[in-house]
Image: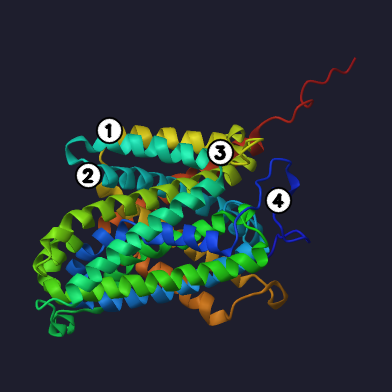
Amino acid sequence: MSNSNPSGTARATDVPDELHRRLGVADAVVIGLGSMIGAGIFAALAPAARAAGSGLLLGLAVAAVVAYCNATSSARLAARYPASGGTYVYGRERLGDFWGYLAGWGFVVGKTASCAAMALTVGSYAWPAHSHAVAVGAVVALTAVNYAGVQKTAWLTRTIVAIVLAVLAAVAVATLTSDTAHATRLDLGGDVTAAGVLQAAGLLFFAFAGYARIATLGEEVRDPARTIPRAIPLALGITLVVYTVIAVAVLSVLGPDTLATATAPLSDAVRAAGCGWLSPVVRVGAAVAALGSLLALLLGVSRTSLAMARDRHLPHALAAVHPRFKVPHRAELTVGVIVAVLAATVDVRGAIGFSSFGVLAYYAIANAAAWTLTPAEGRPARPIMVVGLAGCLVLAFSLPLSSVLAGATVLALGALAYLTRRALARTAPVPGEGNHNND
């Protein structure tokens, strides 16, 4: 059932505090790349190898198929509803207020933890002895960049992406041209199982999820009906090529068993290839990649918080847009403070698992919302949405049990908060009623 307005621009266009449309296709692609080609590729390969061995390559393919379906659905919805908030807006407009809220809740809570984890990743690579202090400094610096305007963010992201791609290219060349690389290590062994491949796909999917950032910036993209459907698949396609090359390179040098136990897979791979001098460069690349992920995550969380605040699911004060910089400055500062406190006080890197669950639930709602589009509204082919929705649910429940339980608990708490608020609103007295005198 569609709740869309005739203009198809969502409710955000009815409020005076709107963001400025400054991003073109190239800017949107770069922001998507900065979100996806981040710290995940430096760390996600090891747990994927533990789950599936050399079958991680199959897991990468499965994750890419599901990501493509999600990207197609998100692109069509973003073109239809070019407002900040991503699936929070799409779910609300197409499925109802609860489903939009649930998507936004899962995104904001899960990605806030991911922000703190990426900040700590920066610290652990840049200055391990003072990782918390470096993490807080990174959050403060990137929050300031986002506060100065989305064009400054796009410029910094472009620089980060260029550095990370250069480092990954050096890793690929060093490993694939070494004598230690053997194609036999890519063979699927007898211990590869369907369950292992699906779990690897769920873990690797986290590294693809950044294309949502393009959709959450829908209110800041020029000509969104044209830009977003072009930018999302471009960013996803480039990322898939890079991930495939790196996965093949590292696996061919280390093999699935060694890769499964690696704490820094890319550094281990260049050392095994006889290029130990490249290891410090990889560490710098990992730190820069984590900065890129953190920058994009802060951007996405603040925009979704803005959309939810406009509908009063979060404090309405967060809906303010800076009169000069045209950014949701209160939402950005609030998110920055929360992330900085988390990064300074706790190590949440081990709690990222539920973020993968939340991201998959987020995209499941996006596919369900896309199903309600009509052909005139640009609905994707039905099989795309079926594969996307089913794939999200299968991968979510194929994650490690601890991740499933944590993610389900977070979503349940959000749903309970929503239903409680609705119940209280229904029972609240209507002003002006109940105090009449019969004089």
Number of the front mark, 3 or 2: 2
By what rule are the colours in the image chosen? rainbow
Return the disc, 4 or 1, that comes first in the chain's sequence.
4
Number of the front mark, 4 or 2: 2
Return the disc, 3 or 2, that comes first in the chain's sequence.
2
Q: At which x and y percent is residue 408?
A: 38, 54
At label 4, the amino acid type is Arg
Which residue position is annotated with label 1? 133
Disc 4 secondary structure class? helix
Disc 2 secondary structure class? helix
The Cα atoms of the two marked residues, 4 and 3, are separated by 16 Å
CB-based contact (under 8 Å), mark 4 and mark 2: no
At label 1, the amino acid type is Ala
> Within the image, what quadrant is residue 359 found in?
bottom left
- Residue 11 is labelled as 4
Q: At which x and y percent is residue 23?
A: 60, 56
The Cα atoms of the two marked residues, 3 and 2, are separated by 33 Å
Q: Residues within 10 Å of mark 1 (few under 14, many from 20)?
A: some
Q: Residues within 10 Å of mark 4 (few under 14, many from 20)?
A: some
Which residue position is annotated with label 2? 124
At label 2, the amino acid type is Ser
CB-based contact (under 8 Å), mark 3 and mark 2: no
